Image (cartoon, grey):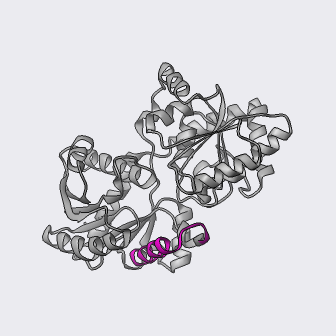
Amino acid sequence: MRIGIDIRALNPRCPTGVGKYIHSLLQNLAGLDGENAYALYYPWRRNSQTWITKNLGRSYITHMGWIPEFLSAERFNKLWLKRYLPSRIKKDGIDVFHGPSFFLPECSSAKRVVTIHDLSQMLFPELYDGISSDAIIKRTKYAIEHADFIIADSESTRDDIIERYAVSPGRVETVYLGLHDNYANPIDRKYAEQVRQKHDLPDSFIFHVGSYHPRKNTEVILEALKILKEEGKNVRLVLSGKKTVYFNRLQKVVCDLHLEKLVIFLGYLPDEEIRALYSAAMMMVYPSLYEGFCLPVVEAMAMGVPCVVANTACLPEITGEAAIVKPGDKPEDSAGGIVTVMENREVRETLVKKGIERAKKFSWKETARKTMDVYQKVAGV
């Protein structure tokens, strides 16, 4: 069987959620599947071939398309999905094509599988920019309606897809994301201390990892911090993520709430530095409005970091009984969860123990195995 995968969302320079998914999936497919042939498709991008060979090995056939990625998103998608991929898929004799980041090529000689990570732009359009968001909604709708099979990151996302698009339940399967093997290894304490000092961080702090975006509901954490400050509990908050235009708004909120001495903004950090900072974190707080999965929470649990999460979308599903679950829209509830972790040693120790066990449920090897099962099912093998 010949399998084609669109890897343009990989973004090796600073991979975030979807990029990490594609990278980890490919690494583990290569280790599990010695029978099928895989072709990877990506746009013209400097040094991409070198990166792919170094990080994914030589077990994949790779095709760098003639379309440069610096075109506008609308122009790029039109060329990539309507012209380049359909012709290339036919030429390469692909049996099953996988779009791991929401989109599928229009018209295909191959069976098509798409991964839908979440429906945030469809469910919360007010949180996204108009033109680009409308295009993504349109492309995602096309993929859901025309895919031979759909992979969802969680049962929550699967339910959203079925309900919103009237999709037959038999066409959608949940395949959880995984956890990198290095989270099973103990952190080098000397290195962790070097990272903490590099960023001039306190000995203990609340940690939040994720792109700066309204969907993350970060303002609730800031308002909870204000409540704690008024109660004489001056706990510090460290935020790490890819900076967006929303970053300026968060800075203003920090100033308005007079939290300048309690909040530290970090930009995008490599995985090893994030892992090092987990080891110093007092807890992870995640009051997000919507998540399709949530890798940072799983990573935090694996590192023995107690979590306080919102009762929204997949978060209760992912954490099970291994986190404190509170309404994400009420700062006082988040503040209460923070105080519980800070002051109740028994609860804290229970969360640490349960979190480590819960995180073992998520494996990239299992993600790859179940994804390969989908390919075979769609191909009728």
Q: Is residue 92 left or right of residue 79?
A: left
Which quarter of the rendered picture does the C terminus lie within? Answer: bottom left
**Does 239 appear above or below 293?**
above
Horizontal and vertical percent position of residue 380? 27, 70
Q: Residue furthest top?
A: 190
Q: Residue placed at 86% from the left, 38% from the top?
A: 231
Q: In this figure, what is the number of numbered marks?
A: 0
Q: Is residue 357 visible?
A: no
Q: Position of residue 236 (x, y in %)?
A: 69, 35
Instruction: Return the residue found at the far left.
Output: 91
Looking at the image, which is closer to me, 136 or 162? 136
Left or right: 57 in relation to 305: left
Vertical arrangement, residue 137 with respect to residue 376, above or below: below
Q: Specify start and end residues of the magenta stretch as a single range.
A: 126-143
Near-viewer residue (272 or 294): 272
Q: Is residue 109 left or right of residue 238?
A: left
Where the N terminus falls, by quadrant?
A: bottom left
Residue at 75%, 49% in the rendered image: 256
Residue 199, by quadrant, is: top right
The answer to whether one can see residue 130 in this image is yes
Residue 126, located in which quarter of the rendered image? bottom right
Nearest the viewer among 77 and 373 is 77
Q: Please, what is the dominant secondary structure of the magenta stretch?
A: helix
**Relative vertical location of residue 360 with respect to residue 216 in this rendering, above or below:** above
Residue 134 belongs to the span the image colors magenta: yes
- Tell whether position 237 is magenta: no
Picture coordinates of residue 359, whole percent (x, y) = 53, 42
